[in-house]
Image: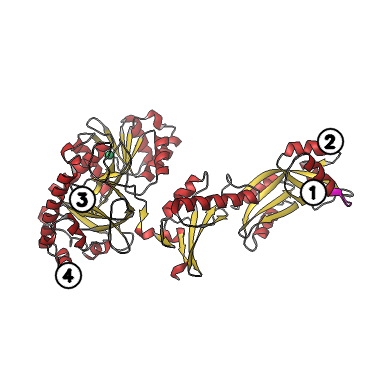
């Protein structure tokens, strides 16, 4: 039920993100979600793409430091309290959210959020038990 | 094993008496035979007879690499060419090469010092020495060669290069001692591995490595990969060649300088002031037995410390620390001496940081700032910004603790730092602009 994310180290220089998107586009890789976490000197670019192997290979060949990370894609009801409900469940279970960001595509009337947890398997189990839909990696790419 | 018990374990008082006598004789001779030294002493208002104690040596002007270049090729020789039996030269990467000469007695002295060195590393008659130092104008190959013969060991004059053949020789001839530069040694190890030859199956017990600076981390790597005792040897052609100082296998803590032939000093590289034992500075040598090419207070530009404490091996000669850098590379940051090599060893300690780094020195509001850019490899890359920041802080803290200087650490993308070996790529000093 996990999904895989590609993380890339980038220096905070103008045009670095577009260098990455350019390489992916040239290799026919479609970006489904993108988030940047940065400091004044560097950032980590996080991507959900439709072809992880291809993305990783082409970026490594271009000299980027790339790493695959396990994340969880969760359906969130598009109404007030939708996200809060999920975060409450996780809080009760003492699972930490390292970071999260929104997926571009909606799934019907639901939004999709990408989460990175400190305990991935545990988080999936609890959320599923509480009736929250977790979308697995392969489904994610076909949305 | 101590090759020359009498001289290598001589009580310091007797040793110093011999040093003074030999120093006075050397000064008289260079004053009489080398116009360069006569002029230097005359200009300084000193006569060789004014040197009445070893301390008086401090009054005599230094000799620099530039002086040797100015007197290219034979201007510094103190013996007639009829008595010179060997000439070596160091390659000049910038400017003229420096040329040195040896009389028959010099060659014999040198062989004796190399025999002492090989012996200190654990070699003796019956050992087979695989000598992979280059033979030629460079002093390494022939220096070790004559010492090995003097010791009575069997020497394989394999020289540098043709690495595959070297591996086959190591397998078939079963040498027990390896002499090479540390970088070529690692290259040999790689080649052997590719050929499916394990050093564990070879017969080496010790290796004597020198001619370039190498770190303690490199020693561990060599000892692990080659399964032998790695000993550091030091020398430079201007002073003699290999065999000016060597580590003893017993302590492996500092290199004994053969003080019955050379007088070492440590000076402040900026002021030229002589520093006491234990302080770090530039190493200066005076030769006191050489005939063809004596040298007075030669500035080696190597940075080290002298340790006069008695050694467990029984030798009484002072020990110099492994050379930590060159004065040419030294940066002064807020009054603290910093060598790129020190930063490099800190980075090597932080596991798996690739030691591709760059130092950027700047001055902001009259304060020096040091930025260390470090390329981040896959193993250390975390996709959590917090962890990457912790990594930066950890490196910064290690630098502060080891060097006593604050540095801002900046992680950099792979291959964004130039790969050249020179100082220019490693260090950017914006203060000079
Ligand atoms: Zn010793």
Query: SS of the residue at dot 2?
Result: helix
Q: Which mark is residue B382?
A: none
* Residue holding disc 1: A113
Q: Residues within 10 Å of mark 4 (few under 14, many from 20)?
A: few
CA separation in Å, label 2 and label 4 = 94 Å
The secondary structure making up most of the magenta span is loop
Give the residue at x 33% y 62%.
Answer: B94
Is disc 4 in the same subunit as disc 3?
A: yes
The x and y percentages for residue B390 are: 59, 50
Left or right: B312 as drawn, with respect to A89: left
**The stretch drawn in magenta includes residue A80:** yes
Q: Are marks 2 and 4 on the same chain?
A: no
Task: Tell me the quarter of the picture where residue B316 sits.
Answer: top left
Q: Secondary structure at mark 1?
A: strand
Name the foreground residue: B16 vs A39.
B16
| Residue with the mark numbered 2 | A129
Task: Name the chain under label 3.
Answer: B
Please tell me how crowded label 1 is: few (under 14), some (14-19), or many (20+) other residues with Cα within 10 Å: many
- Callout 3 secondary element: strand
The part of the image, by quadrant, that contains residue B319 is top left
Q: Chain of mark 1?
A: A
Residue B43: assigned label: 4
Question: Mark 3 against mark 1, which lies toward the viewer?
Answer: 3
């Amino acid at each position: 039920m996990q999904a895989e994310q590609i993380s890339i180290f980038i220096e905070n220089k103008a045009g670095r993100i577009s260098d990455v998107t350019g390489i992916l586009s040239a290799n026919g890789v479609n970006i489904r979600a993108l988030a940047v976490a940065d400091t004044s000197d560097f950032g980590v670019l996080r991507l959900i793409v439709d072809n992880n192997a291809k993305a990783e290979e082409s970026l490594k060949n271009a000299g980027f430091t790339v790493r695959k990370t396990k994340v969880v894609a969760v359906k969130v009801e598009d109404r007030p309290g939708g996200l809060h409900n999920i975060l409450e469940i996780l809080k009760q279970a003492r699972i930490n959210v390292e970071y999260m960001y929104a997926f571009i595509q909606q799934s019907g009337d639901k939004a999709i959020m990408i989460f990175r947890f400190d305990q991935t398997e545990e988080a999936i189990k609890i959320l599923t038990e509480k009736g929250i839909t977790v979308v697995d990696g392969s489904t994610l790419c076909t949305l | 094993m101590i090759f020359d018990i009498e001289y290598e374990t001589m009580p310091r008082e007797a040793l110093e008496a011999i040093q003074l006598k030999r120093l006075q004789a050397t000064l008289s001779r260079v004053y009489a035979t080398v116009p360069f030294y006569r002029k230097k002493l005359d200009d300084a208002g000193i006569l060789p007879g004014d040197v009445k104690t070893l301390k008086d040596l401090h009054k005599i002007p230094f000799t620099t690499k530039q002086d040797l270049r100015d007197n290219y090729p034979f201007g510094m020789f103190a013996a007639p060419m009829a008595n010179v039996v060997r000439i070596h030269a160091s390659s000049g990467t910038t400017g003229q090469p420096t040329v040195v000469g040896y009389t028959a007695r010099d060659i014999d002295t040198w062989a004796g010092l190399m025999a002492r060195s090989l012996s200190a590393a654990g070699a003796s008659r019956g050992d087979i020495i695989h000598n992979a130092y280059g033979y030629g104008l460079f002093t390494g190959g022939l220096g070790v060669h004559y010492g090995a013969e003097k010791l009575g060991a069997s020497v394989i004059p394999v020289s540098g290069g043709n690495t595959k053949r070297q591996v086959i020789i190591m397998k078939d001839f079963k040498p027990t001692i390896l002499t090479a530069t540390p970088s070529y040694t690692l290259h040999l190890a790689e080649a052997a591995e590719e050929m499916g030859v394990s050093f564990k199956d070879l017969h080496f017990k010790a290796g004597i490595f020198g001619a370039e600076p190498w770190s303690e981390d490199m020693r561990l790597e060599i000892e692990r990969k080659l399964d032998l005792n790695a000993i550091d040897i030091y020398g430079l052609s201007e002073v003699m060649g290999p065999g000016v100082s060597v580590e003893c296998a017993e302590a492996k803590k500092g290199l004994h300088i053969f003080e019955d032939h050379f007088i070492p000093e440590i000076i402040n590289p900026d002021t030229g002031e002589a520093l006491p034992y234990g302080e770090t500075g530039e190493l200066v040598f005076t030769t006191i037995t050489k005939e063809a090419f004596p040298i007075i207070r030669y500035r080696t530009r190597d940075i080290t410390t002298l340790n006069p404490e008695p050694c467990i091996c029984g030798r009484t000669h002072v020990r110099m620390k492994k050379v930590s850098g060159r004065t040419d590379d030294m940066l002064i940051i807020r009054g603290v001496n910093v060598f790129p090599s020190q930063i490099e060893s800190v980075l090597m300690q932080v596991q798996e940081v690739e030691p591709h780094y760059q130092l950027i020195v700047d001055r902001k509001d009259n304060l020096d700032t040091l930025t260390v850019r470090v390329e981040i490899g896959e193993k250390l890359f975390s996709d959590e910004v917090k962890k990457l920041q912790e990594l930066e802080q950890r490196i910064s803290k290690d630098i502060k603790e080891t060097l006593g200087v604050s540095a801002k650490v900046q992680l950099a993308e792979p291959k964004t730092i130039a790969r050249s070996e020179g100082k220019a790529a490693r260090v950017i000093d914006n203060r000079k602009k």
